[in-house]
Amino acid sequence: MEAAKLTGIERELVLQYLIDGNVPVTVTPIEDDGPEDDGSKVKPATSALFPIAIKAEQLKVLEQGIILLTNPPQNVKNFIDKKARVEFYFNRLGLYFETKVKQIKAGLALVIPSSISRIQEAAAAPRPTEISAQLYFSVNQKTDVHIDCVPAQGYRLFSKPVWKDIDESAQAKAKAYLEEFIVHARQKGVAGSGVQLIPVVRYLSEKVLKMESVQNRKSPLDILFINHERIVFGQRAGNADLQDGSEYALEMSFPLPRPLSERKIFGTCRVESNYYDEKKELVCAVCRYTSLQEEDIRFLYEKGTGEKFI
């Protein structure tokens, strides 16, 4: 798909917006493989290079159409003379351009090119095959406001989480999170076996947030783990945060072999604890069921363990 490029007038409006507003940007290194990318994907130069957020106070946009980085994060220097994708929001609309990070006397600079494009909508995720769910929020004593919940990509929801599930490059950070969260959970008396914390620290140490086509649009919650006692969600902080100690209605659907269509489970759950990453950009909510039918507990237990529920 060809990226939707801004017209000349639109570009001038955006450039003036950047000059006047000192808008924060995200810089991601990409492979310089010829023509400008069409906006559908970003190919990191190496697995060690991730998007880096540049705060408004760390940059200045000059009238000449140059973003001057003043006291940027140290690791941005790894991008010097590399092609990079620069992303930002203009009135909540996600935009990007590609340029090279240049070293000049005044510091690091990004030249804004003639072409600025809209960030394209991500391709729709395939329909979940193992579970889908909806979490209901109480509004004026009604529970008609809900958010969808979908399995997180790459997570085996009905297998016991193990440490080797976590990418080796993220294990040091995950270990630090785990040590902190275990202490917290024990102090609250909600640690249990602690197995539910492995997908939590994996998510917080591995997940990389991407700039969206529209800022702050509500997204489905990621389901990270589920068994007969708890369900764990992950999301971008500020998306649809679940409050510590609050109770929510939950509906879960499980596809079944033909001629049956699906099994639905209705219940409630309470947030035992919320766990944040160090930047407070991601949050995981560990929820414990507060009401569930015995036959549904049995179903979840046998699905997760492969053993008969006694």
Image (cartoon, helix red, strand yellow):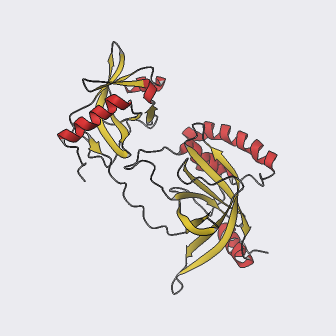
Query: How far from the left and from the top, in percent, is residue 235?
Result: 55, 51
Q: Residue at 75%, 74% (x, y): give it.
A: 309
Query: How far from the left and from the top, in percent, is residue 121?
Result: 35, 54
Query: How far from the left and from the top, in percent, is residue 277?
Result: 60, 41
- Name the residue nearer the viewer: 178 or 290: 290
User: How many marks are shown on the rendered structure?
Assistant: 0
- Name the residue nearer the viewer: 232 or 291: 291
The answer to whether one can see residue 105 in this image is yes
Q: Residue at 54%, 44% (x, y): give it.
A: 206
Q: Residue at 57%, 48% (x, y): give it.
A: 203
User: Residue lying farthest left?
Assistant: 8
Q: Is residue 33 above or below residue 190?
A: above
Q: Is residue 99 left or right of residue 173?
A: left
Locate the C terminus and report the quarter of the image it occupies. Answer: bottom right
User: Residue lying farthest front?
Assistant: 140
Q: Is residue 134 above or below residue 19?
A: below
* Quadrant hosting residue 149: bottom right
Q: Is residue 268 left or right of residue 51?
A: right
Query: How far from the left and from the top, in percent, is residue 157?
Result: 60, 61
